[in-house]
Image (cartoon, grey):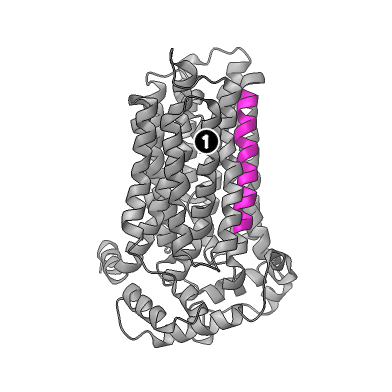
């Protein structure tokens, strides 16, 4: 059987799992449209002769960065609600601030409304990113969990491509009304999807959980998996938990991974580059316009991010992360050198294509691993009883890092030059490569129980003395 036919057979076998994951990640499309909106929208407000809202460059940087503050609150909300009210309905509720925010932007005539709308977008962003890795981790089987989690980034890049392609060619108000499309797609599909069987079993709704697993797996003999999930839920529910449980000694390695994913990856600067894409391209000499370079950037990301969907469960998480961080560092280095020489007065205009190629290499490499694999890892590295807290912590760390990067990026552009933040991004990505190499183990094809065991032993004396085998029969197949 060829690789292509094997993949098609897997798609047919797990199609309901893929369908539920695809519908859930439409929420990511919905919220990332709000994030990418700033690249085409802010230049309209700063450069057009009669904008609907008059702003300064400093106000623009606050409009861009305040969303990450809202994201922190959204992550906290997801952590407080996901185990109390389930995964499905808090997730659906994330569409409310999105709808409200787009209407506010479309009708805005004062900067204050843009601040409030962006904060609401951040809340929805935090809720969506706080819940979707949990939901996907709990509805998918071991063989497809990594590929399904890759849908998160695939939808994010599709949203970026949409905003970059449409934004420069429509009016400010029209762009806001078009943003409602994401919420409409998400609500019209996900409302029909099932609740997580883990949550249902935790609430004693065994028959409903059984029906859900049968629909997801597309076969009726699910009693063994149902019993395994039940045992895991009972173990996880044995004690009351809180955010402080994340800091217990047995979760030390897990926590290190959360810090690497939450802070290290965001210091690579992708959010700043995407938010200010057209502004950055204004400093690059090229035959393409700023808008056209942004579209190329979005299209390249969209195509590249499809590869991890096919390879994350074949090649593995760790190799993709290492290759991704190495390629990202090289691409950023090319941009750093170009902007440094430009600031030094060297005539680099004929070589503007070098920096553009560097940025394209960066987004390709980043999309191939750093943008995708972390969500597969987050969906599996903690037990059920503290998984929501772990995702909330990840969101808080990410929100703080993104706010600092996005806000300070504009300050550096205005007062120093693009070369300074690009060198910071380059060095940070090199350090990230080292941290991934040291602290993130390979977990492909393992059950959730096995993943947590692997991480607890990673880079410890215990791992050397008691190596983990691939004995699937000795452990529960699911959480």
Secondary structure category for the residue under label 1: helix
The image position of residue 289, as x and y in percent, is: 38, 20
Q: Is residue 41 above or below residue 325?
A: above
Magenta region, residue range: 392-413
288 vs 336, left or right, is left
| Residue drawn at 50 percent across, 83 percent down | 230
Q: Is residue 301 visible?
A: no
- Most common SS among magenta residues: helix
Residue 30 or residue 157, whichever sits in front: 30
Q: Is residue 155 above or below residue 295?
A: below
- Residue 176 occupies which quadrant of the picture? top left
| Residue drawn at 46 percent across, 25 percent down | 278
The image position of residue 347, as x and y in percent, is: 54, 12
| Residue drawn at 62 percent across, 39 percent down | 403
For the N terminus, which image quadrant? bottom left
The image position of residue 151, as x and y in percent, is: 40, 55
Q: Which residue is mark 1?
A: 331
Bin the neighbour count of mark 1 within 10 Å (Cα to Cα): few under 14, some 14-19, many 20 and up.
many
């Amino acid at each position: 059987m060829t690789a292509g036919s094997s993949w098609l057979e897997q798609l047919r076998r797990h199609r309901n799992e893929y369908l539920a994951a695809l519908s859930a990640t439409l929420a990511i499309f919905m919220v990332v449209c709000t994030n990418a909106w700033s690249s085409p929208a802010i230049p309209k407000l700063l450069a057009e002769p009669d904008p609907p809202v008059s702003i300064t460059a400093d106000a623009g940087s606050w409009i861009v960065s305040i969303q990450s503050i809202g994201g922190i609150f959204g992550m906290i909300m997801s952590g407080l609600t996901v185990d109390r009210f389930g995964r499905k309905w808090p997730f659906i509720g994330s569409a409310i601030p999105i709808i409200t925010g787009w209407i506010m932007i479309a009708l805005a005539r004062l900067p204050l409304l843009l601040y409030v709308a962006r904060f609401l977008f951040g809340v929805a962003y935090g809720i969506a990113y706080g819940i979707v890795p949990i939901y996907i981790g709990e509805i998918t089987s071991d063989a497809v969990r990594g590929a399904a989690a890759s849908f998160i980034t695939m939808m994010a890049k599709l949203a970026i491509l949409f905003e970059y392609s449409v934004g420069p060619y429509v009016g400010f108000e029209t762009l806001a009304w078009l943003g409602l499309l994401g919420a409409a797609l998400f609500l019209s599909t996900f409302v029909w999807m099932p609740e997580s069987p883990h949550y249902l079993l935790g609430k004693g709704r065994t028959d409903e959980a059984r029906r859900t697993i049968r629909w997801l797996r597309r076969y009726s003999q699910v009693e063994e998996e149902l019993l395994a999930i039940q045992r895991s839920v009972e173990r996880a529910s044995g004690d009351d938990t809180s955010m402080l449980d994340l800091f217990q000694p047995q979760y030390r390695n897990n926590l290190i991974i959360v810090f690497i994913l939450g802070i290290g990856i965001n210091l690579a600067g992708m959010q700043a580059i995407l938010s200010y894409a057209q502004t950055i391209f204004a400093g690059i000499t090229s035959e393409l316009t700023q808008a056209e370079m942004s579209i190329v950037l979005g299209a390249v990301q969209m195509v590249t991010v499809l590869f991890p969907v096919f390879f994350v469960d074949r090649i593995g998480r760790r190799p993709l992360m290492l290759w991704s961080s190495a390629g990202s560092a090289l691409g950023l280095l090319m941009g750093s050198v170009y902007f440094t020489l430009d600031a030094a007065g060297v005539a680099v205009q004929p070589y503007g294509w070098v920096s553009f190629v560097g940025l394209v290499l960066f987004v390709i490499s980043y999309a191939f691993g750093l943008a995708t694999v972390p969500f597969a890892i987050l969906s599996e590295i903690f037990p059920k009883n503290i998984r929501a807290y772990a995702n909330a912590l990840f969101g808080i760390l990410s929100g703080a890092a993104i706010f600092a990067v996005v806000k300070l990026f504009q300050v550096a552009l205005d007062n120093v030059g693009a070369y300074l933040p690009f060198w910071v991004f380059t060095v940070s990505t090199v350090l990230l490569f080292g941290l991934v190499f040291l602290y993130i183990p390979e977990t492909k094809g393992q059950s959730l129980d096995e993943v947590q065991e692997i991480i607890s032993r990673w880079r410890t004396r215990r791992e050397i003395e008691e190596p983990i085998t691939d004995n699937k029969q000795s452990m529960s197949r699911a959480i």
